Amino acid sequence: TPENLESLLHEKQKKRLEKFEEQEDIRFEETKRNGQQIDEARNFQIEEEHGVNSPLLGDSPSDRQQNQQNNQNMGQNRAIIPGILIRQPNGAFRVCCFRDLSRQF
C-alpha cells in the first residue's frame, strides 16, 4: 500500500541520515585529533628549543591545559545548522549550509 511504501521510504531516509551523521562525527573527531597532534608537536618542539615558559608558546602551561579542555568540550557544543549536500565536479560531496549558499549567489 502507498502508506507502507511511504513509511518504508521514511525509514530508509532516516537510516541514511543517521549513517551520514555518524560519518560526520567520525570525521569531526579525526580532524580534532589531528589538530591536537599538530599543536602538541609544535609546542613540544618550542619547549625543547626555548623552554617551557617560552613566549612563543603564547600561553602559560595552565592556559594550555585550559585550551586543551576547551577543545575537548567543543564536540559537545556543536550547533546543528541546516544545509544540503552538494556534489562537486570531481564527484565528491560537500555539505553546504544555507548561510554559505546565500553568500555565493
Image: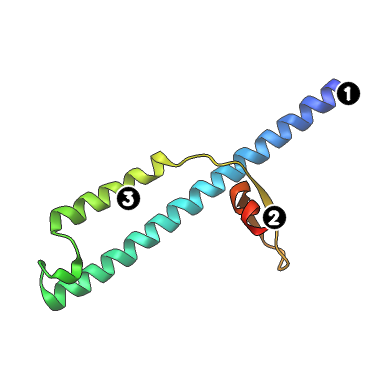
Q: Residue at x 83, y 22 (%)?
A: 4
Q: N-terminal of the two: label 3 or label 1?
A: 1
Q: What's the mark number on residue 86?
A: 2
Does dot 2 land on a helix, a strand or a loop?
A: strand
What residue is pinned by disc 3? 71
The spot of residue 17 in percent (x, y) is 64, 39
Q: Residue at x 69, y 55 (%)?
A: 86
The spot of residue 35 in percent (x, y) is 37, 61
Q: Quadrant of the N terminus?
A: top right
Front residue (pair 2, 87)? 87
**Pair 1/2: label in front:** 2
| Residue 68 vertical position relative to residue 4 in the rendered view, above or below | below
Q: CA distance from mark 1 to mark 2?
A: 30 Å
Crowd class of label 3 (few under 14; some 14 to 19; many from 20; radius 10 Å): some
Labels 3 & 2 near each other (Cβ < 8 A) = no
Front residue (pair 4, 42)? 42
Q: What's the mark number on residue 2?
A: 1
| Residue 86 vertical position relative to residue 5 in the rendered view, above or below | below
Crowd class of label 1 (few under 14; some 14 to 19; many from 20; radius 10 Å): few
Front residue (pair 12, 55)? 55
Q: Please state which amino acid type lies under the numbered disc 1.
A: Pro
Residue 36, visible in the rendered structure? yes
Q: Please state which amino acid type lies under the numbered disc 2.
A: Ile
Q: CA distance from mark 3 to mark 1?
A: 48 Å
Q: Quadrant of the C terminus?
A: bottom right
The spot of residue 41 in percent (x, y) is 27, 69
